[in-house]
Amino acid sequence: MPFPALYYAGAAVPALLLIAAAFLVLRKVPAAEFSAPGVPEYDPGEADRAAEALAEAIRCRTVSYPDVTRRDFSQWVALRRVLRERYPLSHERMIPEHTAGLSTLYKWESPEPAGEPILLCAHLDVVPAGGVWNVPPFDGHIGDGFVWGRGALDCKNVVVCLFSALESLFEGGFVPGRDIYLALGHDEELGGPEGAKQFARYFAQHGIHFSLVLDEGGFITDGAFPAGKPVADICAAEKGVMDVRLTVTAPGGHSSHPPERTAAGLLCEAVCRVGFKLRPARILPLVYDHFNTIAPLLDGTLRRYAATPRFYRKKLLARLCADERTAALVRTTVAPTLLTGGVAPNVLPPSAEANLNIRLLPGDDAEGLVSWINALTRDLGVKAEIVLNEEPSGVSDYKGAAFSALAGAVSDVFPGIPAVPGLCCGASDARHYEPFSSAVLRFSPFIVTLNELAAVHAENERVAVASLGAAVRFYRRVIERFCSPGGEQGNPGVKETGGNGI
Ligand SMILES: [Zn+2]
């Protein structure tokens, strides 16, 4: 073929122009900016009452220890008494439709249900409180504008704010246009085997399907990376949880004559091999949409990558992987959490064990993970067994009416704060309710700083009294939007509502 270079050059001119034009269009950041966040309005009296109820709830030590003999079930009974006394109308008018152990499923029946019910969820148990606290973790101390103690953010705050909203609606004579269920689990921190899993069986047996399942989940975090500004993170999916036990055996004996390969040494090598070898990263469509929605809040190149994530997929992925705060959104993570072995400083342990806590990205599976661990550690003689396996959730509809109505409630209470679909890296009871709704959404409507968020499952857990007031308003607006008779927005409450969502 003569003059191939010219031929190609001729074709290349319009092609280059097209590529350049496409590049300019693609790199353009969305023009629509979010309005500046306003201050949420709330009733200070309502916030104070919620704070007092929360403080009292924290004093009930509903600690979920894996060892059942360590659990003091009288504390759950005490907590239920606190709730009954604080919220008498709710307990008088809502039927405890089903109980499972110390978990209760309440129902507020609509006289004329005009659509599928909604399910509101929270859990009554907490994790143990180790470490050094500024105030004792079960004193229920109120001070400096905060309620302090184990469960203040995870999630007795949700329990009291849900009840506060329900109680005020009963007081105001609200009549729901669809049934409202309230599921209070007692063992969420252990995976919900006796609570949420049993409720799920009940829903299956009775063919109950919900227009919305709302559980704890993403917060409104002020200063979170990478947005830097508050964003309402409404999670449409959650990662799976696995515990894998690694066991190594080797001859024990006197530590003065150690063999080349000891059980403890082999275990350490296995943990390092697995821990330092990262799983492949990928961006789920949900995570694409999360960053695309918050793009106007980002700075610099990240803003450009997030605005056109499909065009800058690799660059966006590299940026997300480079920071541990976002890396968990794009890959399955492995964290060694328990290491056990020796009994004395001068004794070689005959066996050593480690627990790997693994958070699976939706799409990854347990069998694949164990094969990968086996392949990495086979030559060390390590045995890997699955101790716990909770699969990742599916991804709920975050472009439909339910998400939009929730985003509308965010806009009502938290003006200027965008509602953004997200992925939960932690687990919740909500995953057990997946088969019963296309909208299983996880959102905790509390404004928190990064420091406050870091106190969940750690020392000095606390929640701002003001944020309790706003959360009560939020839950009330959710119920009004979904359950007003005839539908506040038409078609019982779940139509297009606007707000700062996508
Ligand atoms: Zn929780």
Image: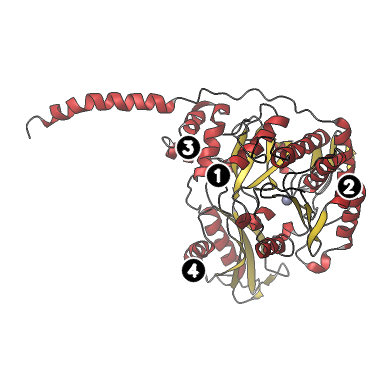
- Nearer to us: label 3 or label 2: 2
First in residue order: circle 4 vs circle 1 = 1
Q: Is residue 341 above or below residue 290?
A: below
Q: Neighbour class for label 1 at 10 Å: few (<14), some, many (≥20)?
A: some
Task: Please report contact status of discs 4 and 2: CB closer than 8 Å, yes or no.
Answer: no
* Residue indicated by mark 2: 89
* Residue indicated by mark 4: 378
Residue 260 in percent (x, y) is at 55, 70
* Callout 1 amino acid: Ala
Closest to the observer: 225 or 252? 225
* Callout 4 amino acid: Arg
* Residue indicated by mark 1: 327
Q: Secondary structure at mark 2?
A: helix
Q: Secondary structure at mark 4?
A: helix
* Residue indicated by mark 3: 316
First in residue order: circle 4 vs circle 2 = 2
Residue 328 in percent (x, y) is at 57, 47
First in residue order: circle 1 vs circle 3 = 3
Q: Neighbour class for label 4 at 10 Å: few (<14), some, many (≥20)?
A: few
* Callout 3 amino acid: Leu
Q: Secondary structure at mark 3?
A: helix
Q: Neighbour class for label 3 at 10 Å: few (<14), some, many (≥20)?
A: many
First in residue order: circle 3 vs circle 2 = 2
Marks 1 and 3, how far apart at CA: 11 Å
Marks 4 and 2, how far apart at CA: 61 Å
